[in-house]
Amino acid sequence: MTTTSHTKSNTTSNNNTNNRLQFLWNASHILLPTVPNLSAYYMQQFHQNAAEKNLILADGIKRTYCSYCGNIFIPGINSQIRVINRKEKRKRKKLGNSGENNKYQYIRKKIDIEKDINNINNEGGEEKGSKIS
């Protein structure tokens, strides 16, 4: 019987936590236009309660408010949103940020310049190994 009473109290505790978090979330969003400071306070409480219960919040929820001050992000007013085109993102990944492609382009250009110098030397009637000073 102790296991069933323990399970009931655990379930009741989970329900209380869930209800508390729902209240804080809803109250914060409802009060945002009229009392922003109280809204931020409720979001701080929401974050603290979730952390105390070791709950892992979804990324979508974490991105909607500041975990430090509790302010809810409003795009264009207190936050900015940047959209990256998928094609540009692929190009950046393909080229890489390490500079490897730039290194190979430099080597190719250097080889092409050396070939051009050798061609100029050969056209002038000089020997193949000579260099232009």
Image (cartoon, helix red, strand yellow):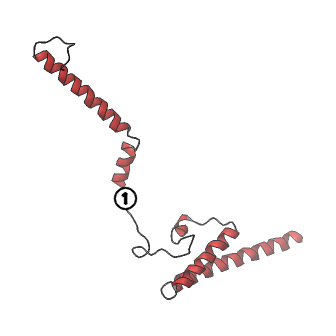
Q: Position of residue 116 (x, y in %)?
A: 18, 24
As drawn, 118 above or below 44: above
Please tell me in which quadrant of the rendered image residue 21 appears.
Answer: bottom right
Camera-nearest residue between 37 and 93: 37
Q: Secondary structure at mark 1?
A: loop
> Label 1: few (<14), some or many (≥20) within 10 Å?
few
Q: Residue at x 60, y 66 (%)?
A: 57
Residue extending farthest to the bottom is: 34
Q: Is residue 26 left or right of residue 118?
A: right
Q: Residue at x 70, y 69 (%)?
A: 52
Q: Is residue 87 left or right of residue 124?
A: right
**Residue at label 1?**
84
Camera-nearest residue between 62 and 100: 100
Amino acid carrying label 1: it is Ile
As drawn, 120 above or below 5: above
Q: Position of residue 126 (x, y in %)?
A: 13, 12
Q: Position of residue 29 (x, y in %)?
A: 53, 81
Residue extending farthest to the front is: 133
